Amino acid sequence: MILLAIVLGLGGPYYHDASACLVIDGKVIAFAEEERFSRRKHHKDSRSCAAAAAYCLSEVGVTLAQVDEIAIAFNPAWPTPSDTCTDADLIAELLDPGLFGHHRPRQVTVVEHHLAHAASAFHPSGFADAAVLVVDGSGDGVSATLAHGTAAGCRVLRQFPFSQSLGWFYETVAEHLGLGNWTSAGMLMGLAGYGNPDRYQLDFLTPGAGGYHLDLSRYGIRPDERVEDQYTDLRYYRRLKTAYATAYTGLGIPPHRRARTYTGGRIVPDTGFRPEHADLAASAQRLLEQCLTELAREALAATGATRLCVAGGVGLNCSANGRLASLPGVEDLFVQPAAGDAGCAIGAALEVALRRGDLALPGPAMTTAALGPAFTAGTVRALLDDYGLSYRDHGDNLPTAAAGQIALGRTVGWFQGRMEAGPRALGRRSILADPHRTHTRDHINNRIKHREPWRPLAPALLDDAAPALIGTSTPYPFMIVARPATEAARTAIPAAVHTDGTLRPQTVPRDDTDPYARLLASFAEQTGRPPALLNTSFNHEAEPIVCTPRDAVATFAASPLDALAIGPFLVRKDRLR
């Protein structure tokens, strides 16, 4: 009998972005976010990782009782150091015994939150030596970490406390402008492209050699104030939000509450913005980038490394990552595609595997995020038949048929293979369209996604088209690093170019066995234009990315998508009327 070393990592400990990752013999076998199963965005207000964990175990047919070690990505006893947790109620909250034959693990291994983030970036990077930068709202009392990644793992060099949080700074700007709470901070990045970053001086946050310094003394919070006892009950967080609101209001920008109307069965938000809103967004974005740049320089200098790894919720900021990628001294950049708290499941599992001797570093580089559930053609066909949908089985020619629809200007839901990890659709659960047609981008934002018209959509392109469109042959497989658009890109794929002249590409290797790569190639053959498509996540504004065929069909039916390419089948709306 061959004995396998099985580790289960659990992410999202702070009542959002719960997830699970299964690592066997040091290799990531499966990863999924709980929201994809609960159908509740970010799986807010719950720690349960049970459905995601059950999926991961089912991928290889093992039970929870057969798992050698379970890792969680936070310290429930904070600020008291702890290596393990034996709290039966907490463990049952994370892993509902009802889904696991009533098995109740007696303990779980504690991996400090920022170490889990750091491991999620460095361990799968493929780098032998790298500087590691973790920046988020906060976790286990820390908001930023500089570390050195080597064959021995990640060694923490310096940390910034939660009272110096860059993630919370950025989040409060988004909230002040009416863009939503922390779950919507990414909207600010898109709005920033429309603003003037010189208009507002946010002098309470100062970048400088070695990092940055936050001083909100004018607004009631001194940087030397002892606030550790206000962390876990969120008193400090509430005080911080009040302080920032006062600061932004003092700039002449009162808190904005966007009007919402109820139209056609949907709540439709006000998607407009005023110049001062865009200017504040631009000022905040530039300041964030300046602070991150100083942190990265410090990490690179302290480690002597030429490679940089990034994780933490702020690591989802494509524009900032583009700035880091262009820093002198950065030869290679790896950003964990699930950079937020969900990705901590990957880091916690890999960190424990390293400690157990199951993982040797450097390991193979993570080149795909396709780690979630897949469904057979038979399962998809049965569902389509149950719904009474008319479809055509194109077999291996499905990419050609779907490309033909896109070439005609139609929007296509694309559901193929294993679901991707992270918040960016990467050709497994995508909505695809012609990037040459800007009105199609506007149609997707307005009618399909029901979101702000100023939010950019991204291009997916074959890697051999990258030099012409993004000016480099460096792979960008995860749509998480912004690049300046070339003149060729502005002409050929204008719908994917943001107003600031950047795009956030996903490069795809040319591969005749990959339906996604074949789709891109076929689109180029049918149109005579570059092998590039407009790509956004397959969901509407109130739901997570679709996971199952049933999710895909429901979203397709409820939206003005023209066609659904699911498995080998193509469903067209014009044939359903």
Image: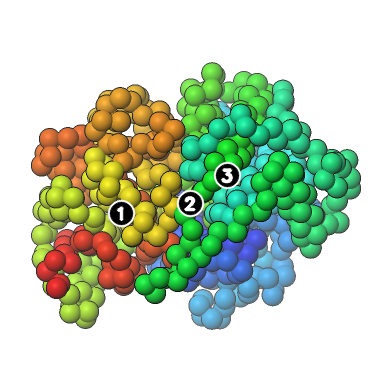
The answer, for residue 574, to whether it is visible in the render is: yes
What is the distance, in whole Å, between disc 3 and disc 1 at their CAs?
Answer: 24 Å
> Would you place residue 148 above or below residue 45 in this image?
above
Residue on which disc 3 sits: 277
In the image, what residue occupies the spot 30% across and 25% down? 487
- Give the amino acid at mark 3: His
Residue on which disc 2 sits: 272
Of badges 3 and 1, nearer the viewer stands 3
The image shows residue 534 at horizontal and vertical percentages of 29, 45
The answer, for residue 355, to whether it is visible in the render is: no
Question: Mark 3 Cα within 10 Å, few/some/many (few <14, many 20+)?
Answer: many
The quarter of the image holding the N terminus is bottom left
Color style of the picture: rainbow
Whether residues under marks 2 and 1 lie with C-beta atoms below 8 angstroms apart, the answer is no
Residue on which disc 1 sits: 443
Whether residues under marks 2 and 3 lie with C-beta atoms below 8 angstroms apart, the answer is no
